[in-house]
Image (tube, rainbow, N blue to C red):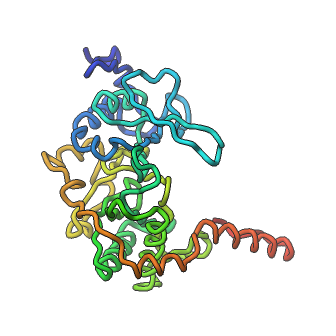
């Protein structure tokens, strides 16, 4: 069957396929489902075994991040309970391990897919370091690319290698796989040190300043994706006009790339039969001791920013002004 009457794939009933996903999306629910189906063999290995959060857009509603699976979730969707310290409750996360589950998410108008950096089997052990390259407001993609090359140099200087992908928004993500023996605390420290080393290579271009007002138009090297953090997955669509896709690239292709090149309509043909995320991913390696040691001397950015924000707020109140934005 076709049209708004729906159809069935792999036992999943698909409905309202010809409706636009959201105002200005430039894509229908059918476009989303077709994309997910076309790349499922490459997308599922990225998601499999990892507690998954998704961004959904229901008709006539604002987008929202869904972590806890709804009560009507079908029995074929695997789930895993995870304790949420912030809300002091157990959350039932989905595990998107097969095509049927992925199609079901597509039918639920789940546009973005954000798996945890750790697997459900080893929740306290992230599998990758991640640096998020975030250009400033009004900054173009080219400055993010230049900052990503700084991170690559910092990685090479300490014997590490990473794979880069567009975030699907305006920035880039760099992933570095590490061995299972590394602790989450040491990995978080290594990320802080890598960001700091990249910043030192060109402090006029890049910054590790967590408080936005302290960045002064520079690219933010965000090293805070640690422990239980999630990141938009490789091949995940993003909730933006045209539905761009987080797309992995060889470093040699990065300078000529533009985020708008990779969308749910263009990505399948660009991929062909390839899986660049798997093909380009380096083998996991142990973290250099000096990198970890340096990172442990660098304060955790969010904690430091919280204390600094409180200090500035008190100072602003005494002066009768406003505290800077974070």
Name the image quarter holding the N terminus: top left
Report which quarter residue 171 is drawn in: bottom left
Q: In the rendered view, would you say 309 is above or below 157? A: above
Q: Position of residue 265 (x, y in %)?
A: 26, 41
Q: In the rendered view, would you say 81 is above or below 273? A: above
Q: Which of 24/103 is in front?
A: 103
**Side (left or right) of 208 relative to 175:** right
Q: Which of 123/265 is in front?
A: 123
Q: In the rendered view, would you say 134 is above or below 32? A: below
Q: Which of 81/146 is in front?
A: 81
Report which quarter residue 209 is drawn in: bottom right
Q: Position of residue 80 (x, y in %)?
A: 46, 36
Q: Position of residue 274 (x, y in %)?
A: 15, 50
Q: Residue at x 37, y 39 (%)?
A: 26
Q: Residue at x 60, y 76 (%)?
A: 214
**Side (left or right) of 3 relative to 131:** left
Q: Position of residue 300 (x, y in %)?
A: 57, 70
Q: Residue furthest front?
A: 181
Q: Which of 46/253 is in front?
A: 46
Q: Residue at x 58, y 75 (%)?
A: 299
């Amino acid at each position: 069957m076709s049209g708004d009457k729906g159809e069935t794939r792999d036992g999943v009933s698909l409905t309202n396929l010809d409706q636009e996903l959201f105002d200005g999306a430039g894509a229908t629910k059918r476009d989303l489902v077709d994309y997910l189906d076309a790349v499922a063999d490459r997308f599922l290995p990225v998601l499999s075994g990892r507690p998954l959060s998704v961004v959904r857009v229901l008709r006539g509603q604002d987008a929202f991040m869904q972590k806890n699976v709804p009560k009507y979730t079908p029995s074929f969707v695997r789930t895993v309970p995870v304790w949420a310290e912030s809300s002091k409750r157990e959350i039932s996360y989905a595990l998107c391990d097969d095509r049927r589950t992925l199609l079901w998410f597509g039918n639920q108008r789940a546009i973005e897919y954000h798996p945890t950096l750790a697997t459900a089997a080893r929740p306290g052990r992230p599998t990758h370091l991640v640096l998020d390259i975030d250009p400033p407001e009004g900054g173009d993609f080219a400055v993010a690319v230049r900052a990503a090359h700084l991170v690559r140099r910092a990685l090479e200087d300490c014997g590490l290698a990473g794979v880069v992908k567009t975030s699907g928004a305006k920035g880039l993500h760099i992933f570095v796989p590490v061995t299972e023996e590394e602790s989450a605390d040491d990995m978080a420290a290594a990320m802080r040190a890598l960001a700091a080393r990249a910043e030192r290579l060109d402090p006029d271009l890049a910054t590790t300043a967590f408080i936005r007002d302290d960045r002064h138009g520079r690219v933010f090297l965000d090293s805070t994706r640690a422990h239980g953090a999630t990141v938009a997955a490789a091949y995940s669509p993003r909730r933006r006009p045209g539905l761009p896709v987080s797309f992995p690239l060889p470093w040699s292709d990065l300078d000529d790339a533009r985020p708008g090149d990779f969308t749910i309509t263009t990505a399948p043909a660009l991929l062909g039969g390839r899986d660049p995320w798997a093909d380009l991913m380096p083998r996991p390696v142990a973290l250099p001791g000096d990198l970890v040691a340096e990172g442990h001397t660098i304060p955790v950015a969010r904690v430091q920013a919280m204390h600094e924000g409180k200090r500035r707020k008190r100072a602003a109140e005494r002066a009768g002004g406003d505290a800077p934005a974070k």
